[in-house]
Every structure is written in C-alpha cells, then in structure tokens.
Amino acid sequence: MKVELGAGGFRYDEFGAEDAPAMVLVHGSGTDASAWAAVVPELSETWRVIALDQRGHGGSVRAGEYSFELMRDDLLEFVDELGLDEFLLCGHSMGGTVAAIFAEQYSERLTGLILVDSPPPDGQGDWTVPPEPEEDPGFDWQVIVSIFGQLADPDPAWWADLWKITAKTLVVGGGSTSGVPQELLVKVAELIPDAELVTIEGAGHAVQRTRPAELLAAIQARFGS
C-alpha cells in the first residue's frame, strides 16, 4: 500500500482485522517493513498491524534528507493520514530511536511502546561512515551518512526527555551477543516511568528475526489481553 505524505510517497504493509487495535512497526536502517515478517502473522491475530517503510527505504521516497526528527515527523504524518488516534508503537534499532522520540512528544497517542534492542544514542562508539557500496544497497546510502552523524553527536534531549514517556513500555534487549550496550537498555527502563525490561539472551541485535517466538511472548505478556 502507498500513502502520500509531505516528503513524497510512503509504502506500508497492513495485516489483521481493520477494527482490531492498531500496532505500528518501525524498522531499522538498511531494511524495510519486511524486517518484521517473522512476527507479523501472530501479531496480526490480536492487532491491526501496520509496518511502514521509512523514508529512504523499501518502496518509500528517497528524500535525500534524513534525520531521526524527520522520521519522527513522517511517523506523525503517517498515523494522522491513516486516522490512527491511538496505537501501539514498536521500533527496532534506528526505528526504536524514532519511536522513543515520538513517544517523548506524543505519548497521549500511544496505547504502548516497544523498543527492540534500541536505546537512544549516547555518542559512544565509532560512527565513522563506511565506504558506500559499489552496488545499490537497496536503500538510500545518504541515510547512513546522516544517521551516523547523529549517532556520533546525539541530541542530549533524547535521553533527558525519556521521563516524559507516559505510555506503558516494553524494552527488549538482545543480550550479550548484541552490539548494543545492554546497560543502556537498563537505564532506559529505569528512566521511563512505566517500563519493563526483558532480555532475550543470545538473540543479538535483530531480535525479531533471530528469536521471534520469545519476542512475541514478551509482547503478549505485556500488552496482550
């Protein structure tokens, strides 16, 4: 499916009953809505699942300009266009930061928040942009250039405003095999007032792909009826 937003056309997938509670899935960098393929069938038994291709990815517009804030604004425009007054928001990696900064401003729109192996950037680590692949990587390489710049020099408000997230939150960690420092996820869960941390040891970063059943169990335990 496609929808026209301010930046251009955005592609998304939708699953489940139209009258079910809505859940919006936001993927990480270099992927697209298909990153959630292993968990969508079961999620769509409970929720109306909507998986967005973020700008520069999949079938969505190659906007040329990228930032976490622009992707947050895309998300707001997207859910408004679809008429989603309330929804459960789930983000992985880059999409998790988009989801977190969305929740800091628009918690009243959320029935819940799920952050999959994704704390806000803390400026640590080596964020040197790798060489652009000779072959088309399947997404706009400018995403990496722009996002790595923000990862190296993040907005301090992304951490400072976590307390503003009033939505019920599930923080999921991939454990010791993830490249994400798991102690940052502990801090996220401490700073968000109504947050629970679940670590799926050995899952690595792409939890929804490597350990879908355990991720689904954690989501159902926190948000299922």
Image: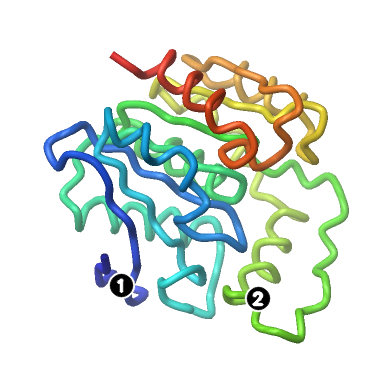
- First in sequence: mark 1 or mark 2? 1
Q: Position of residue 187 (x, y in %)?
A: 69, 22
Q: Is residue 215 above or below residue 198?
A: below
Report which quarter residue 78 is drawn in. bottom left
Q: Is residue 161 visible?
A: no
In the picture, the disc for residue 137 is: 2
**Who is closer to the viewer here, 59 or 61?**
59
Q: CA distance from mark 1 to mark 2?
A: 25 Å
**Mark 1 near mark 2, Cβ–Cβ under 8 Å?**
no
Q: Position of residue 64 (x, y in %)?
A: 53, 80
Q: Residue at x 18, y 33 (%)?
A: 20
In the picture, measured across the screen, residue 157 lies left or right of residue 79, that is right
Determine whether the residue tagged by mark 2 lies in a helix, strand or loop: loop
Q: Is residue 84 above or below residue 188?
A: below
Q: Is residue 115 visible?
A: yes
Determine whether the residue tagged by mark 1 lies in a helix, strand or loop: loop
Q: Is residue 12 above or below residue 105?
A: below
What is the quadrant of the N terminus in the image?
bottom left
What is the quadrant of the C terminus in the image?
top left
Q: Residue at x 31, y 48 (%)?
A: 50
Amino acid residing under circle 1: Gly
Q: Is residue 40 above or below residue 151?
A: above
Q: Residue at x 47, y 26 (%)?
A: 216
Residue projecting furthest to the left: 19
Amino acid residing under circle 2: Pro
In the picture, the disc for residue 6 is: 1
Q: Position of residue 207 (x, y in %)?
A: 62, 36
In the picture, the disc for residue 57 is: none
In the picture, measured across the screen, residue 155 lies left or right of residue 225, that is right
Mark toward the viewer: 1 or 2 = 2
Q: Position of residue 60 (x, y in %)?
A: 41, 71
Q: Residue at x 32, y 32 (%)?
A: 110
